Amino acid sequence: MTPFRVLITGVGSLVGTGILDVVEGRRERLWVMGTSFGAEAPGVFRCDEAFFTEHSDGAAFERELEDIISRSRPDVVIPGRDPDIGVLASLSERLPEVPVMVGGPASARLFADKLATFEFARASGLPVVTTSLATDGPIAPPAIVKPRFGSGSIGVRILLDRAQLAAARQEADSVLQPLIGPVPPIPDVSQGWPLFWQCRPARQGGVQGLILPDGAVGPSLAFEVTHEAGKVTEQWVVEDAELVALGAGYLRALADAGWRGPANVACVHTGSEWLGLELNGRFTGGTAARTAMGFDEVGLAINAWAGREVLRPRPATLVRRAVMQPSALGLVDSEVETFRRTRRWP
């Protein structure tokens, strides 16, 4: 049987690494290809084929990706980074014959723009954390300011007084949200700042789901997480009916908006209810952990797009909790140099 050809963009990312991890040992009917902006990416050398890109976003990257797709002829393209979602959505609109695991540009914008996420949730009647432009929102401190189009918690700050809030209101491309959870203790800095300091977030969870190619809402999993220094360190499966229902509502609304593929609904608990916080239109850094807990999200998605069983099911598991720890991945200098020089692997 001809292998199903998958192209993972940003295969060296945390998401790309997670996808490679969960298909390991099940690739008999799968041909894995990847793209990478950098040569020193271990994920590249775990692929059957990989392609170097000179750009990481924007129109130039879209042209590069279009050329790679025309040469590699994948059966489906899977986004491995946030910027790839919009690029693939744009490609799918211009070239509908290109098979991509995303929706159209309008639905892709819901993941990139935090204000659009809020407006979409409100219009869909879904509980959501209040979000407004930093320049004119009614939110008072304590609050959170974050880039409107950012990701990965980069640029997120806590505002504890009106002076900080006033400064944040000068940022045209930022949004404000109320700080949900306890106000973090401010360290005594009279003797200097501590080398490490963090804000303990409120109770957080999410729902990872799949919207099938025909627009049907596929399987999903509700979970809670713990964070350390901005990173998820632990996930566990929950049977929280409110969280499950909230995730189902978001997934149905995203499907109606034209989204196709994986979708992650990040949620926060106020102490009395769950609210939607952010949306991700891809697999996430927690994909491998959820797979270990029995939710084979990558296998489900690839098999759905293939229309057949490409990835055989993983063994049943009793695992309901997963601890996330960094792992070391080796690099061979000669392989890195070959990829950098030839722009292709192998």
Image (cartoon, grey):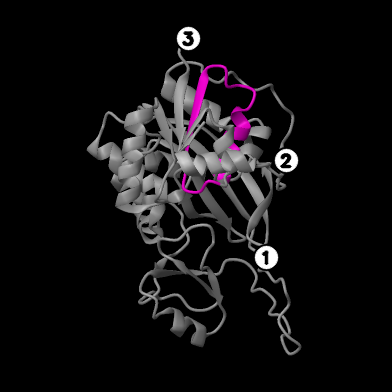
Q: Residues within 10 Å of mark 2 (few under 14, many from 20)?
A: some
Q: Nearer the viewer, residue 266 or 283?
A: 283
Q: In the rendered picture of this protein, how many numbered marks are placed on residues? A: 3
User: Which residue sits at x=55%, y=69%?
Assistant: 179
Mark earlier in primary sequence (3, 1)? 3
Q: Residue 282 placed where, x, y %?
A: 47, 42
Q: Is residue 267 above or below residue 174?
A: above
Q: Which one is closest to the eye, mark 3 or mark 2? A: 3
- Label 2 – label 1 distance at C-alpha: 20 Å
Secondary structure at badge 1 equals: loop
Residue 167 place in picture, x, y as percent: 45, 83
Which residue in the structure is indicated by mark 2? 321
Q: Amino acid at mark 3?
A: Met
Disc on the earlier residue, 2 or 1: 1
* Crowd tier of the residue under label 3, counting other residues whose Cα lies within 10 Å: few below 14, some 14–19, many 20 or above: few
- Please, what is the three-letter code of the amino acid marked with disc 2? Arg
Q: Amino acid at mark 1?
A: Arg
Disc 3 on helix, strand or loop?
loop
Mark 3 sits on what residue? Answer: 1
Which residue is found at the position 37% from the left and 61% from the top?
A: 115
23 in magenta: yes
Work out how far the residue at label 3 is from the one at label 1, CA to CA, in angstroms. Answer: 51 Å
| Residue lying at 44% horizontally and 24% vertically, measured from the top left | 5
Going by the image, does 119 lie left or right of 11?
left
Crowding near the residue tagged with mark 1, few <14, some 14–19, many ≥20 C-alpha atoms within 10 Å: some
Q: Are marks 3 and 1 in contact (CB under 8 Å)?
A: no
Asked which secondary structure carries label 2, the reply is strand
Return the residue nearer the eye: 99 or 112. Answer: 99
Given contact means CB atoms under 8 Å apart, are the residues at marks 2 and 1 in contact?
A: no
Q: Which residue is mark 1?
A: 200
Q: Which residues are magenta?
A: 14-39
